Amino acid sequence: MVAEQAARGALPEEVRRGLREAFAREVAARLPHLRRPDDWELVRHDAHSLASSAWVVGERDISVLARAVEEQLESGAEPAELGALVAALEAVPAP
Amino acid sequence: MTAPVRTDVATVVVVDDSPVQRRFLRAAVEAASDLTVVGEARNGKEAVALVARLRPSAVLMDLDLPVMSGIEAIERIMASSPTPILVYSAHVGGPESANAVEALAAGAVDVIAKPGPEDTTSLEEYADQVRKKLRVAARVRVITHPRGKLRSRGLAVPTQPVRGATQVVAPTPPPVDLEARPDVKLIVIGASTGGPQALQTVLKSLPLDLPQAVLVVQHMAEGFIPGLASWLDQLVPMPVVVAVDGGRLLPGTVTIAPSGYNLIVQDDRLRVACVPPEPNQFHVPGIDACMTSVADVLGPDAIGVLLTGMGRDGAAGLKAMRDRGATTLGQDEATSTVYGMPAAAAALDAVDRQVAVDDVAEVLLGLVARS
């Protein structure tokens, strides 16, 4: 019961710090594909993952941009927000 | 010394290619003392191998995975190491909505919407939802899934559209223990866990020119009902639509109750209304609410069918229908993914006949056939 009450509260700071570190590593791993896109399916998948990962760490702007890129590619449109997404990801502190 | 194995802890394998998601889900799951993560997989192929090796109580899986897709991984797991799979999916209104329904049809037991930029859910609320869904999923007894078996043997999976195909349906005599009901106006079907696959099995054998309207109430997470309708529409002879408030149910058409409301049949012209659920109602749309309304307005001129599902929603509604003279069917235990709702109905003496899912359509056609 105590554990469950804790679970309903805020995530511990050490968990949040770990999530931010993992996000920085994920950004570093995906940025090269996004800077030089030669496989649009890979870009769509990266954007899909980043939209959710960014939401988890509270990076709402990145989450919005990533979701926009994903949806643009799914609809067959040019990913107009890709440049803005790359710029926002480059602003994330390196791991 | 080896620590004693706790049998009251549900073991979970998390499948996601994002390290952020895996770390978050591990933290969310392990915040509860009755759940623990025993393994993490980064793609579908790893997931299949890990589940076979660890045999967890449940799997928590994204669908958009590299190397092997989530759908294929679900099919393989359900064919070789049947395990309750809870899918989390990012898009409830987009293409992934149909994928989520496809995942349920492939054998996943439930789906939860993954929050995104448009969500107001907090991280902690989402973690709580995941834990609740996992606890339920971990209790589900799953069986080897036929679609996975077909694929593993290299055989074609029957998913081709059949709309417009000429269907010759020979008159089928009604089951000997049931009275023919050719004047029935409506067949109402309730389903929950395992429902999408069961619905496909039943509806694919009902013809385009069926004189009755078919109404389906399927428990499903908010936002996924349009995906269910779209998926079924491609696979079954009759058109499949989502009900609208004030609309009418039409013969030869499958209408699915929408998310977020109870669907009530208002009169014998089959007009429907979407009404707010009761406070604290667990399953929305509710099967009990719908079937009770059908009992009230149609009495014996309806047939009720309760398919696979956890819990007891639909049992009281089916009983109300039977008490008003309707014929009622319940899916049998052997073919139910979860023999919960049909068992509850049988215990209430709400079921005229228990039927294997493969035989439900034939029984229905026998009941409504004109001699």
Image (cartoon, coloured by chain):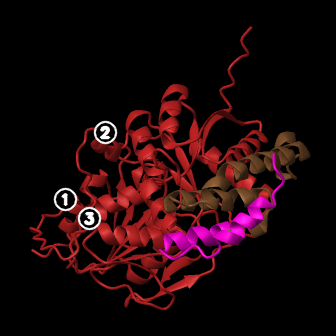
The amino acid at mark 1 is Pro
Is B198 rendered above or below residue A16? below
Is residue A76 in the magenta section?
A: yes
Q: Nearer the viewer, mark 1 or mark 3?
A: 3
Q: Residue at x 63, y 79 (%)?
A: B276
Q: Which residues are magenta?
A: A66-95
**Counting residues from the N terminus, which is met first, the one under dot 3 or under dot 2?**
2
- Per the image, label 2 sits on a secondary structure element best described as helix
Return the chain for callout 3: B
Image quadrant of residue B190?
bottom left
Task: Say if B106 sits above or below B329 in the image.
Answer: above
In this rendering, which labeled residue sits more in front, label 2 or label 1? Answer: 2
Q: How would you rate the neighbour count of disc 1 (Cα within 10 Å): few for under 14, some for 14-19, many for 20 or more?
A: some
Q: Say which chain tag 2 marks.
A: B
Q: Which chain is red?
A: B
Q: Are marks 2 and 1 on the same chain?
A: yes
Residue B152, which numbered label? 2
Give the residue at mark 1: B175
Residue B247 magenta-highlighted: no
* Residue type at the position of mark 2: Ser
Dot 3: element: loop
Mark 1 and mark 3: span between their CA atoms? 20 Å
- B274 is higher (above) or lower (below) than B348: below
Instruction: Give neighbour class at mark 3: few <14, some 14-19, many 20+ (Cα, 10 Å).
Output: some
The label number, if any, that marks residue B324 in the structure image = none
Q: Position of B211 compared to B315: left or right?
A: left
Residue position marked by numbered label 3 in the rendering: B204
Residue at x 27% of width, y 75% of height: B238
